[in-house]
Image (cartoon, grey):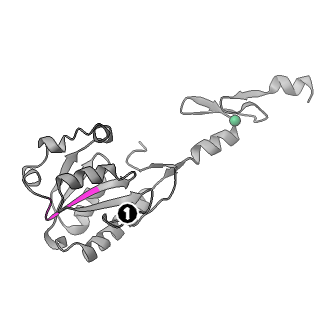
Amino acid sequence: MNSNQESNMLICMECGPTMSEVLTNVDGRLLCSSCKFENESSHIYLTWDHISQFVHRLDHMLKLSCHMYGHARIAGVSRGGLVPATMLAHHMDRHDVVSIPASRRKIEDGLFEARTGRVDQKLHQSDGNGWIIVDDILDSGATFETLRYRWPRATFAFLTAKKLEDGIYIGEQFIGSTRWIVFPWEDV
Ligand SMILES: [Zn+2]
């Protein structure tokens, strides 16, 4: 390597000196082209077409497995579950979708707004019977586990899951990966 090449060398904030001819800003860090590629491939970007197919299949699964399907009410876990819950409601021709305010951070803290009654009155008073509770992703399972404690007779449905689970919950889109899943409603 001669001194001329060396002086042209760029410094990638991930791998250091690089032969790459351009650095790109990825989340505030200037990265070479190969680090940019690796960084972006650590995310899975789902499209509306994926979501539409997932909801369609989830609706089909619920039809087969949920005895309350014909007159079930629908609740979405805020925020991520609200969009799939609404789409599912269109499939099932339901006019109401109820929100369960349960942020992931609060779940980890064990502090559930849902437990304090800040949910729809009918859902609050029920044991979950006749309700389908929808979330966007089944990750550790902590969200559904806690909600199931509160509404033991509800049907729990997920749009996607990071790992296979034992079949308590309904859904089929397993994305076995440590990659970060980005839903189209998050990618704004
Ligand atoms: Zn690099």
Q: Residue at x 52, y 49 (%)?
A: 179
Identity, as a three-letter code, of the amino acid under mark 1: Ser
View extreme (right): residue: 2
The reply, left or right, for residue 117 in relation to residue 18 is left
Coordinates of residue 70 in the picture (x, y in percent): 16, 73
Towards the viewer: 138 or 42: 138
Beta carbon of the mark 1 residue lies under 8 A of ligand 1 = no
The secondary structure type at the circle numbered 1 is helix
Coordinates of residue 60 in the picture (x, y in percent): 31, 73
Label 1 environment density (alpha carbons within 10 Å; few <14, some 14–19, many ≥20): some
View extreme (bottom): residue: 64
Coordinates of residue 129 in the picture (x, y in percent): 13, 63
Instruction: Identify the image quadrant of the N terminus.
Output: top right
Residue 149's place in the image compared with 113, above or below, is: below
The quadrant where residue 172 appears: bottom left
Towards the viewer: 38 or 146: 146
The quadrant where residue 56 appears: bottom left
Q: Which residues are magenta?
A: 128-134
Tell me, yes or no, whether the highlighted magenta stretch contains residue 9: no
Q: Residue at x 63, y 44 (%)?
A: 38
Q: Residue at x 90, y 23 (%)?
A: 3
Residue at label 1?
52
Coordinates of residue 2 in the picture (x, y in percent): 92, 26
Q: Quadrant of ligand 1?
A: top right
Instruction: Identify the image quadrant of the C terminus.
Output: top left
